[in-house]
Image (cartoon, rainbow, N blue to C red):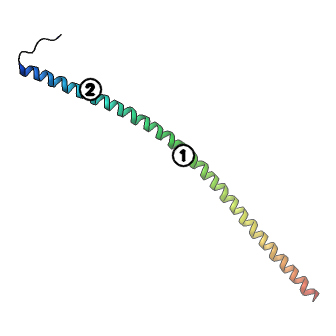
Amino acid sequence: MGTMPANKNEQNLQENYSLNLTLLEEKVVRLVEMVKSLKHANQSLQEENQMLKHQLMKTESSLVEETRDLEELSQEKMMARLLVDDLIKSIDSLVDQKE
């Protein structure tokens, strides 16, 4: 046990010191809890970021593949149109020869 305070002022100082120390301890505990919470949130955000990066890469890859397919289909359509035009010209030529 501690010694008895010599006077009332010393007792008030000790009580204030004790109260300030208690408040400081409470603030430190809250700060530690906040830091833990922020670390956990940061970890979650990093994991979500990695997942979103992976999804973005898959989407970009899919988009590139779909664009390539679309270009191929466009070329095939152009070739088909040219072939149909040639067939129509050939048919017209045959019809003109028959007349």
In the image, which disc is placed on residue 25?
2
Q: Which mark is residue 3?
A: none
Q: Secondary structure at mark 1?
A: helix
Q: Amino acid at mark 1?
A: Lys
Q: Quadrant of residue 64?
A: bottom right
Residue 57 in percent (x, y) is at: 58, 48
Residue designated by label 1: 53
Hey, which residue is sitting farthest top in the picture? Answer: 1
Q: Who's the residue at 71% across and 66% down the image?
A: 74
User: Is residue 88 shown above or below 77?
Assistant: below
Neighbour class for label 1 at 10 Å: few (<14), some, many (≥20)? Answer: few
Q: Mark 2–mark 1 contact, CB under 8 Å?
A: no
When the figure is inspected, residue 97 is found, relative to residue 73, above or below; the finding is below
- Residue 53 placed where, x, y %? 54, 46
Q: Residue at x 81, y 72 (%)?
A: 83
| Quadrant assignment for the N terminus | top left
Residue positioned 19% across, 25% down in the render: 19
Residue situated furthest left in the rendering? 7
The residue at 74%/70% (across/down) is: 78
Helix, strand or loop under label 2:
helix
**In the displayed structure, would residue 5 be above or below residue 52?**
above
Question: At which x and y percent is residue 88?
Answer: 84, 79
The total number of labels drawn is 2
Q: Is residue 13 above or below residue 55?
A: above
Quadrant housing residue 16: top left
Q: Which residue type carries mark 2?
A: Glu
> What separation in Å lies between label 2 and label 1 (alpha carbons)?
42 Å
- Where is residue 38? Give x, y as percent: 39, 36
Is residue 14 found left or right of 27 in the rendered image? left
As drawn, the residue found furthest toward the right would be: 98
